[in-house]
């Protein structure tokens, strides 16, 4: 089955007992909290989102993939079968893997799952609520799909700062190329830009034919069915490649209530810029007269809009009593020709609702980050692409990250030397750019200030795995020590993905309370692929046991310098073993397959 779920009360019979026993082999379980189990086959399917057949990545034949609907503190077990023709990792964007970077799904912490192999993730959505998404983290694979939503609900004992919506709608928006991700990789490897996307998808579908010249006939588009007078929660995720999008619903106000795990000050927007990798929740009330359907629009931003008109996603909001199809021009995007600070001021307006609770009973605003002493400061500056060793690369502080064959966390576990260096500069240095596996040495329980300085010509969006950070400031120009005088030290929004405008800076504060190796990266796939990332190493020097970090899982994958420790697994659909890989016994896979084949769960 695709994405089946269990809670304590739903678990029943011998099959479930076998499965729980088997998953206990992976990592220690949290017996007091429910489990949610998912069994996914990641494979290619053929789809035509923009009218041209192409190969996309699906989760158990779904594109986009299923939404994981869980509750805070639940344990999540995801059995992943890699049916692609290349290695695979899935990462859980925004899910804070508390003291458990082993499950993070990026190259710094995990060996990839080879083609034809299984691997099972297990993690806990500890003290989290909100809207997140997952996606494949290797080699521009997200440009071909493989993404889906993660909805983490409050426990019943925790109040939500708004009434229960009449419905919950997840909408994935993102720029899209007709070329497959392998061709996009070849273009970047050849030193080329990706160029203008071919369109914007909404939930994996192309635009409604609002314009007969720009939109070909016969393209499937998304329709959201609603009832008049009701209020719906829209969870919007920009899962695209590199394009910032302005999101709007014709004639409807969007009340912002949450972003990436934080309840926000509630305010209405007629449109909002949503940058690559970002997620937002809005409450939208169906208060129009339904004289016709309404447009839902996501259009490209910070580009030459006269040339990028085709890079517009259009879905339809359909009232049950609608009197006709949507027609006429799309609702206008922001006109900031004379106001270059429109989008930045919009971003500054998004603040934490300090009077509300979140995943924990205490209000999250009681964490007075503005009065905590900063222990480390890193200014991370990106520049336009440069040529290093004859190849086009991107950098942070003049360093283009070069992933080693052995994951960083695995190298630490086995005390391997020479895999990485702890010498990432705290400030940009006046020296030639270089390739390196240079890591930030974070101080456990320290309070780090990170300033992202964007000296490129396009918006860059930065994300930190394993953590949420407080967004305390952003402005145009070069950051200086005096810029701290403009910081928001009270209700800056806490989130995990933040935009940095070209020629501008954004400052965040983060409490390093989770042990592990944590990826700081740009979410724009092209600049990420070319090297714009770094890892933060957080180690408790007083604890060599497993008290402050979960132990290495029994099903850990080995590669690089540790490849000889791997055991062979027979790839599915094959009678012979090809790559040496470790998998935790056959019981887990057998139990998963047995439950997946017998549809006993709703």
Image (spheres, grey):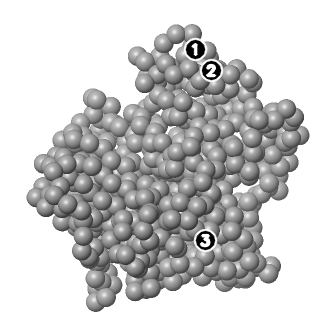
Residue 15 is marked as 1
Please report the residue visible at 37 percent of the width from the left and 42 percent of the height from the top: 129
The x and y percentages for residue 70 are 42, 34
Residue 167 is marked as none
CB atoms of marks 2 and 1 within 8 Å:
yes
Q: Is residue 298 visible?
A: no
Compared to 158, does 431 lie above or below? below
Badge 1: how crowded within 10 Å, few (<14), some, or many (20+)?
some
Q: Where is mark 2, residue-wise?
A: 594
First reached walking from the N terminus: tag 2 or tag 3: 3
Q: Nearer the viewer, mark 2 or mark 1?
A: 2
Q: Where is mark 3, residue-wise?
A: 527
CB atoms of marks 2 and 3 within 8 Å:
no
Residue nearer the viewer, 436 or 219: 219
Cα distance between the residues tagged 2 and 1: 8 Å
Please report the residue visible at 63 percent of the width from the left and 28 percent of the height from the top: 27
First reached walking from the N terminus: tag 1 or tag 3: 1
Residue nearer the viewer, 283 or 127: 283
């Amino acid at each position: 089955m695709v994405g089946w779920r269990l809670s304590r009360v739903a678990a029943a019979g011998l099959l479930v007992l076998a499965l729980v026993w088997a998953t206990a082999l992976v990592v220690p379980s949290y017996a007091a909290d429910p489990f949610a189990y998912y069994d996914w086959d990641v494979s290619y399917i053929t789809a035509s989102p923009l009218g041209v057949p192409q190969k996309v990545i699906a989760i158990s034949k779904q594109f986009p993939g299923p939404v994981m609907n869980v509750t805070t503190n639940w344990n999540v077990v995801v059995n992943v079968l890699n049916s692609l023709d290349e290695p695979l990792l899935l990462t859980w964007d925004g899910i804070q893997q508390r003291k458990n970077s082993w499950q993070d799904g990026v190259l710094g912490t995990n060996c990839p799952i080879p083609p034809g192999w299984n691997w099972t993730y297990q993690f806990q959505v500890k003290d989290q609520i909100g809207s997140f998404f997952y996606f494949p983290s290797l080699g521009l694979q997200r440009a071909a799909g493989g993404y889906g939503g993660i909805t983490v609900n409050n426990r019943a004992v925790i109040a939500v700062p708004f009434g229960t919506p009449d419905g919950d709608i997840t909408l994935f928006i993102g720029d899209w190329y007709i070329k497959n991700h392998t061709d996009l990789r070849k273009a970047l490897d050849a030193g080329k830009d990706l160029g203008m996307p071919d369109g914007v998808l909404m939930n994996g579908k192309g635009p409604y034919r609002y314009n007969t010249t720009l939109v070909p006939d016969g393209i499937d588009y998304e329709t959201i069915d609603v009832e008049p007078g009701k209020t719906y929660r829209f969870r919007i995720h920009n899962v695209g490649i590199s394009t910032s999008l302005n999101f709007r619903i014709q004639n409807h106000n969007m009340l912002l209530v949450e972003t990436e795990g934080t309840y926000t000050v509630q305010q209405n927007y007629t449109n909002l810029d949503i940058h690559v990798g970002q997620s937002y929740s809005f409450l939208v009330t169906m208060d129009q007269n339904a004289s016709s359907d309404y447009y839902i629009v996501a259009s490209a931003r910070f580009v030459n809009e006269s040339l990028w008109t085709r890079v517009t996603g259009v879905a339809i909001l359909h009232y049950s009593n609608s009197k006709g199809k949507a027609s006429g021009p799309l609702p206008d995007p922001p006109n900031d020709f004379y106001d270059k600070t429109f989008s930045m001021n919009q971003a500054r307006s998004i603040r934490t609702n300090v009077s509300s609770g979140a995943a924990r009973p205490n209000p999250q605003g009681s964490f007075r980050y503005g009065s905590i002493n900063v222990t480390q400061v890193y200014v991370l500056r990106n520049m336009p692409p440069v040529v290093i060793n004859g190849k086009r690369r991107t950098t942070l502080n003049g360093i283009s990250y070069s992933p080693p064959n052995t994951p960083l966390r695995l190298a630490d576990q086995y005390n391997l030397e020479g895999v990485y260096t702890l010498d990432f500069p705290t400030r940009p240095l006046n020296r030639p750019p270089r390739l390196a596996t240079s890591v930030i040495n974070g101080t456990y329980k320290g309070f780090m200030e990170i300033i992202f300085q964007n000296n490129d010509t396009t918006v860059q969006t930065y994300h930190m795995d394993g953590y949420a950070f407080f967004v305390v400031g952003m402005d145009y120009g070069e950051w200086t020590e005096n810029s701290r005088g403009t910081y928001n030290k009270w209700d800056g929004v806490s989130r995990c993905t933040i935009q940095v405008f070209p020629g501008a800076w954004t400052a965040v504060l983060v409490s390093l309370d989770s042990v592990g190796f944590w990826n700081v990266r740009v979410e724009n796939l092209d600049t990420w692929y070319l090297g714009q990332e770094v890892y933060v190493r957080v180690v408790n020097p007083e604890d060599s046991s497993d008290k402050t970090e979960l132990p290495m899982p029994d099903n850990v994958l080995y590669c690089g310098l540790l490849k000889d420790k791997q055991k062979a697994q027979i790839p599915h659909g094959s009678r012979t073993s090809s790559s040496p890989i470790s998998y935790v016994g056959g019981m887990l896979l057998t139990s998963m397959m047995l439950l997946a084949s017998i549809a006993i769960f709703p």
